Image (cartoon, rainbow, N blue to C red):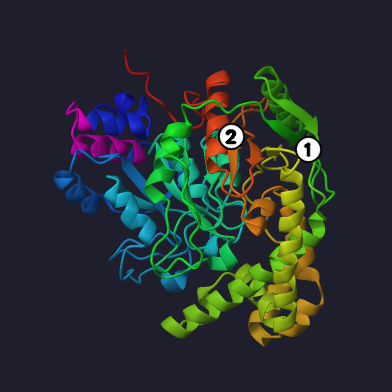
Amino acid sequence: MRVDEYLAHDAVGLAALVRDGEVSAADVLEAAISRAEEVDPRLNAIIRPMYEEARRRAATAPADAPLAGVPFLLKDLFQDYAGVPTSMACRAMRDIPAPAHAEVVRRWLDAGLIPFGKTNLPEFGAKGVTEPREFGPTRNPWNLARTPGGSSGGSAAAVAAGIVPAAGANDGGGSIRIPAACCGLVGLKPGRGRVPFGPAAGEPMHGAAVNGVVTRTVRDSAVLLDAMAGPEPTSPYPIAPPERPYADEVARDAGRLRIGFTHRSPLGTRVHPEAATAVRNAAGLLEKLGHDVEEAEPGIDGRALTEDFLTLWYGSVAALVDDIKARTGCGDDAFEPDTHMLAAMGRSMDASVYVRCHEHWNEHIRALADFHGRYDLLLTPTIAGPPIPIGRLDPPAWLRAAERALVRTRTDRIVAMTGLVTTEVMHNLTATPFTLLANLTGAPAISLPLHWTPDGLPLGVQFVAPAGGEGLLLRLAARLEEAHPWAQRRPSAVPFPAPAAS
């Protein structure tokens, strides 16, 4: 299979070729590897090739699975592949093989996908950019000086550059939707409990973190959600299954929807004019499609919601660092300074503060439910402006000095009490203030590539649905994809062959 032929198909299309015997899984895989070797040196999206393992799997892959023979990449966080390390971009975990497949990986394999590598991310997925110390930055295929977002930045860069039609991702604060918005992709965050996280974990961060994918087409997102969805024996709170397969939703009419939109930052911070334009243009397109659209937003204190979320995040990082130290015997130098700062915040908190902030989540859930009592969907920018330059979120000198002092003296409580860390984290979140809402409330949400800036950078918009609304999101996304196609747009910073002849 030629690379130009490979690039002409999404995952569903490639699987159809394999099922029909027009091409073998092995040939499709070689086209994907060839594409990776051509463009990834510019991107640094793949941090652990698995070529030989993938070739063995492709040679014996059955052709009747829903995604038979489709090349795929796993995010190197919570997506364990037995015998292959899951580094989480942390030096301490770089060479420790995973003992078993994660449940979501097992389901992807059962669906016929052929993983041939693992993708880059910030350490522990803790940032909205992908610039880990251990592996170096991943670059955006639309502009190599810009971030592909994070934390699933390696996966998004690989999909946008045509290495794979879809790749594994996960989302604890926007990590599917932010890179999708930065790279011109579809990024569906399933609702809480829809996709399993086991067997190593039940529902990380009380269900705020979920597994998923980034794709170029809506139908790929739907078929992959069908492959992933459903409880496992260790699922803490299994939820009701969908009325029908998600793949069937793509062909269904969305009906006439009531959609409230806003481009005001929940933090009250600046939103770039292009992000506001993206939302207004999307609202105009929705009106043309017959939907009722008006400016509205949930009655939620965005700063309070963010602080409640961060308390849980700080605690989660502290627990993860302590667990890795206990398991590996590693020292402080195995972790990035920023990670130490977040962990210090977590260790400084009383348990009562942690519990109280978690109980506040219910207030935000009720407020979003009240909004969805009046509107079917919420429309916002996914990110507050175009993808930022690589290095823009590097900590300032004063914070670097504080981080060095922390590692030397272990003054966790003193550093945390200054409030300097939260001030800096809040500053960084001004670039991505819109995504936390869906994680904290457990709502499904999707980023769609409906806007490009005048200088050619993607800037996605986000739709947030009520609980169980993944099908609604897919129905609307498919109609928007028909009205405003995006899948054939190709980034300019990596080479593409001429399209395959029809």
What amino acid type should be assigned to the residue bearing mark 1? Thr
Residue 422: numbered disc: none
Secondary structure category for the residue under label 2: strand
Q: Please name the residue that numbered disc 1 is placed on.
A: 262
Where's residue 2, x and y in %?
26, 26
Q: Nearer the viewer, residue 439 or 393?
A: 439
**CA gap, disc 1 to disc 2?**
16 Å
Q: Is residue 296 above or below residue 418?
A: above
Q: Nearer the viewer, residue 72 or 194?
A: 194
Magenta: main secondary structure equals helix
Q: Please name the residue that numbered disc 2 is placed on.
A: 448
Q: Residues within 10 Å of mark 1 (few under 14, many from 20)?
A: some
- Please say whether residue 30 is one of the residues in the magenta stretch: yes
Span highlighted in magenta in the image: 19-36
Q: Nearer the viewer, residue 454 or 401?
A: 454
Secondary structure category for the residue under label 1: loop
At horizontal 79% and vertical 45% (from top left) the residue drawn is 265
